[in-house]
Image: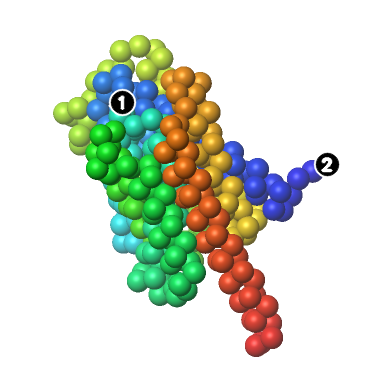
Amino acid sequence: MRLSGTPLAVLLLMAGVSMFAIQDTIAKLLGEAGYHPLQIVWARYTSHLLIATVVPFLHRGPLPWRSARPGLQLGRSALIAMATVCAVTALKYLPLATAATIAMTAPLFVTLFAIPVLGERVGWRRLMALAVGFCGVLLVLRPGVGEFDPMALVMLASAAISAFYLTLTRITSRVDPHEVSFFFTAVVGSVASLPAMFFVAEIPATGWHLAMFLLIGCFGGLGHLLVIMAHRHGPAAVIAPFTYTQLMVAVVLGWLVYDRLPDAFTWAGAAVLVGSGLYVWRREWARTRAERRRIPAES
């Protein structure tokens, strides 16, 4: 039986976000080994760049660098590079599951940013769901409690910046092919972090460290490719909830690599976040279906 359509899209999306969880685990291991976050970011985007140039070249020939909105592409790519620096910095100190839970706030921020940037209207039900979701964040962060780690705020900043990047990506996706956005993301991240290599770069101490530097961008680039393919086979409104696979994979990796499971507060915060995110997705899906039914009637 050959998979196609939405079932294939779900599997591709789950595989793609799982690659992101593995990428984060490698970044954490390299950070704990003493490598500078900018060196990790440079390795991540340089490996990504190799994928972003070789794969499209094999399929189409010319490199996908022509954009209808180059300024916007550069801006959104700079944003995701900044988000990656924040995430890599925070991952060194935070448990994988905690970092992944905080990262799951990005869809909530996307809904907020879509109001001023895209001019979308958000009803009171979705606004209440967003408020509940951010209450889940407070459960994870536990501000004012002795266990509070300031690096959690750095991870939250990474999620917010990533959300703004995703919001701008919704604009570029209307005028540029996915390969163009994929290419710009890799180029900007690699070139922007390159000057720092003259000051912070260290030769990998072991062959295992060298392998991780090579693999981190491969997992990240492969994850982006799989997510792009997923959205080609199925509507985003249908497959979006399966993004939470990344959180589950992060929990498993945290247990396998560090023999550590999330505490009760993190589990509770994750449950609130996922629940509110699923509600927002349900409202978005219902709105999209209503618009599709209305369009034929009006045409």
Instruction: Tell me which residue sits at (48%, 49%) in the image.
Output: 272
Residue depicted at 65% across the width and 43% down the height? 11
Looking at the rendered image, the quarter that the C terminus falls into is bottom right
In the rendered view, tell whether residue 35 sits above or below residue 80.
above
Q: What is the three-letter code of the residue carrying label 2?
A: Met
* Left or right: 139 in relation to 218: left
Residue sticking out furthest to the left = 199
Of helix, strand and loop, which one carries label 1? helix
In this rendering, the answer to whether 199 lies above or below 246 is: above
Q: Residue at x 83, y 41 (%)?
A: 1
Furthest residue to the bottom? 298
Name the image quarter holding residue 269. Answer: top left
Q: Describe the element under mark 2 as helix, strand or loop.
A: loop
Q: CA distance from mark 2 to mark 1?
A: 44 Å
Question: Horizontal and vertical percent for residue 108?
Answer: 43, 57
| Residue hosting label 2 | 1
Q: Which residue is mark 1?
A: 31
Amino acid type assigned to the residue bearing label 1 in the image? Gly
